[in-house]
Amino acid sequence: MAEPPRKAFVCGHPIAHSRSPKIHAHWLRSYGIDGSYEAIDVTVEAFPAFMKKLRRGDFAGGNVTLPHKETAFLLADRRDAAAAEIGAVNTLWVADGLVYASNTDAYGFAANLDERAPGWDLGRIAVVMGAGGAARAVVQALKTRGFAEIRIVNRTAARAKELADRFGTPVSAHGTDACRELCGDADLLVNTTSLGMSGDNGVPADPAWLPDRAVVTDIVYVPLNTPLLAAAKRRGLTTVDGLGMLLHQAVPGFQRWFGTRPVVTKELRDIIDRDIEQR
């Protein structure tokens, strides 16, 4: 008797903007897997009930996005090391009536740079703009890759200090007034803020402050060529856009739910790139 198709999801509120269904649908077709992946709008109030439903085995698992990442961390039965260090989750799977949780954002961030700027992790000093949830994953990735100094720069210095205290050595916290000096010897500049999103021409830091060897990456992917990346290119620096992080973070979840480890290809990137342009 054939097994029923395996089902997965992405949930958030709102969720219509998510590109995850396109990513996973492409992989399901490419690997000939009988399965599905759907977007489900779940309000903050309804999320605890959704987690209870998940334990019943209605889904193999799924992704969690805003505003549920921290609540999912608290409600999951088991969490892996990445989730525990970051304090938020984006990937869930079900086994023996328990909900397991991970955070694959750090993996996605690093895998994107591995693909687009090999050797990026040979650097020792990183400057991270922003101190929100995305910054947590980035700092965890940088710490795992052995950066000697990770300098968090945020408009609200107290938020930066809170993040630095969470991760400890080698992470430090700074206000934006110190940004120019901090960039002077940096090997990597990462933007995790919303500056540069469509309709926003803001640049979180001037690439002119960076040394010639620096790599600049922006986790924003709408638009792909953010004002920060455009300025860094004019400066002649190596740049990496944020789309690859979105694609690579989806890999571990798909493998968990459907039993096949997918590959991020140019074809997939082009599909999502066209979708971004059409919206």
Image (cartoon, helix red, strand yellow):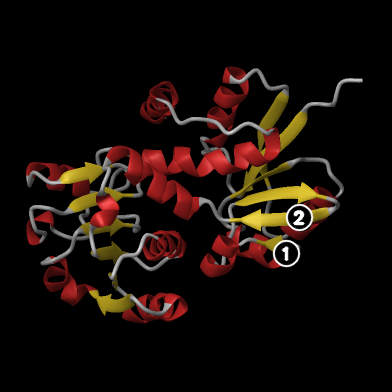
Q: Residue at x 26, y 64 (%)?
A: 126
Dot in front, 2 or 1: 2
Seen at 73% across and 22% down, the residue is 34
Question: Looking at numbered disc 1 in the image, what kind of residue is underneath it?
Answer: Leu
Relative height, residue 194 to residue 84 (above, below): above
Mark 2 touching mark 1, by CB under 8 A? yes
Foreground pick, 236 / 14: 236
Counting labels gives 2
Quadrant of the image for the N terminus?
top right
- Residue 75, label in figure: 1
Q: Which mark is residue 138?
A: none
Would you say 7 lies left or right of 157 here?
Answer: right
Q: Amino acid at mark 2?
A: Val
Where residue 208 sits: x, y (%)?
A: 7, 56
Q: Earlier in the sequence, mark 2 or mark 1?
A: 1
The answer to whether residue 27 is left or right of residue 151 is: right
Q: Tell me the quarter of the picture where residue 115 sits.
A: top left
Left or right position of 212 against 75: left
**Residue 99: image tag:** 2
Asked where in the image residue 268 lies, by quadrant, the reply is top left
Q: Residue 178, image x and y in percent? A: 17, 76
The C terminus sits in image quarter: top left
Please, what secondary structure does the residue beneath circle 1 have? helix
User: Which class describes the residues within 10 Å of circle 1: few (<14), some (14-19), or many (20+)?
Assistant: some
From the viewer's side, name the closer residue of 194 and 232.
232
The residue depicted at 25 percent of the width and 65 percent of the height is 127
The correct choice, above or below, for 272 with respect to 220 in the image is above
**Where residue 183 sits: x, y (%)?**
15, 66
Residue furthest out toward the right: 1
